[in-house]
Amino acid sequence: MQFIAMKTNDGKDKGEIALYCRVLKVSRQGFYGYLKYKDRPWKYKWVSDLMWEILKEDECNDTYGRYRMWEALKLRYPDKPIPGERTIYRIMEEIGICHRPRRKPNGITKADKAARKSDDLIKRDFKADKPLEKCVTDITEIKCSDGKLYTSAIFDCFDVAVLGLAMDTNMKAPLCVQTLRNAYNAYPGLRGAIIHSDRGTQYTSSEYRDAIKLYGINQSMNSDGGRCHDNARCESMWARLKEELFYGRYDTEKMTVAEVKELIWRYFMSYWNNRRICSSNEGLPPLIKRRMYYDSEKGMVA
């Protein structure tokens, strides 16, 4: 429409309108309707301005799709009449900030078929009614200029908070043990929780099993012959990390391990846990949902 308006001097050159409308497959009625309303103020300009403010808050916010943008607007501006999700999508399309996912990573751990396994206590049920009840853990690989960086994390199924995080240039058992130690030191209430993993050699090692026993954790593993769906929650977290932090933003193969490590630590422990809109938490960042849970528990006791 804008092109036709430009070529026809806003419809004043009548002889050209029919030609351009026919070539561009636009009805003349539609074009005249566009001319009628094009100079009127856009009624959703104020919403688009709020969206740009949200995008400025964190560099990873530009990966928000329509649902998370809608949740972010309601959370940040509770006193404003935020329109519905479908309208939010149309506004995002209009101002060119619609985000479309690219790709998802595959798992990298390899199962040790000869090692003793633990039962699958999760059975693909990744819902939890309270914090520190069910957790999932896994490792992902990121290529850097001076080698590979392996990131291990433990996520709480209650609010997808990162409880423990560790990184190294190898993916041996000590990496997973350190992740477990970091999580337990930060959350001693983890004792008695279920921590689910795949059947990688790291998780079937005696070193990891000893740590599990030391911290009083109930170990759970993918079912025999299971696929990535048995630990789909973790696979989803890694996909989000790479989609939101790296793809189209940082070329990790031109960065050192130390530089990438700092980015990941800041992403998970600062942005993910405290500020990132999480659709599975009804828009709440993980630790905000956790605090609300504990506040409600205190209220019930009082």
Image: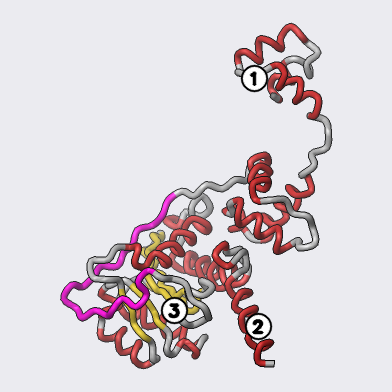
Q: What residue type is labelled 2?
A: Ser
Looking at the rendered image, the quarter that the C terminus falls into is bottom right
Q: In which quarter of the image is residue 284?
A: bottom right
Question: Which of 13 and 301 lies nearest the eye of the viewer?
Answer: 301
The span shown in magenta is: 103-124
Q: Where is residue 66 in the image (x, y as percent from the top left)?
A: 61, 51
Q: What residue type is labelled 3?
A: Lys
Q: Position of residue 283 (x, y in %)?
A: 62, 64
In the current view of this chain or complex, which residue is farthest to the top? 15
Asked if labels 2 and 3 touch by Cβ distance under 8 angstroms, the answer is no
The local crowd at label 1, few if under 14, some if 14 to 19, many if 20 or more residues have their Cα within 10 Å, is: some
The local crowd at label 2, few if under 14, some if 14 to 19, many if 20 or more residues have their Cα within 10 Å, is: few
Q: Distance between the residues labelled 1 and 2?
A: 57 Å
Q: Earlier in the sequence, mark 3 or mark 1?
A: 1
Q: Which residue is drawn at 45% across and 55% down?
A: 254
Helix, strand or loop at mark 3: strand
Q: Position of residue 266 (x, y in %)?
A: 56, 69
In the current view of this chain or complex, which residue is farthest to the left? 114
Q: Residue at x 48, y 76 (%)?
A: 128
Mark 3 highlights which residue? 134
Question: Which of 6 and 159 lies nearest the eye of the viewer?
Answer: 159
Q: Which residue is drawn at 71% across and 25% down?
A: 2
- What secondary structure is the magenta-colored segment mainly? loop
**Can you see residue 294?**
yes
Mark 2 highlights which residue? 296
**Can you see residue 167?**
no
Q: Position of residue 250 (x, y in %)?
A: 51, 55
Looking at the rendered image, the quarter that the N terminus falls into is top right
Q: Which mark is residue 26?
A: 1
Q: Distance between the residues labelled 3 and 2?
A: 20 Å
Of tags 1 and 2, the one toward the viewer is: 2
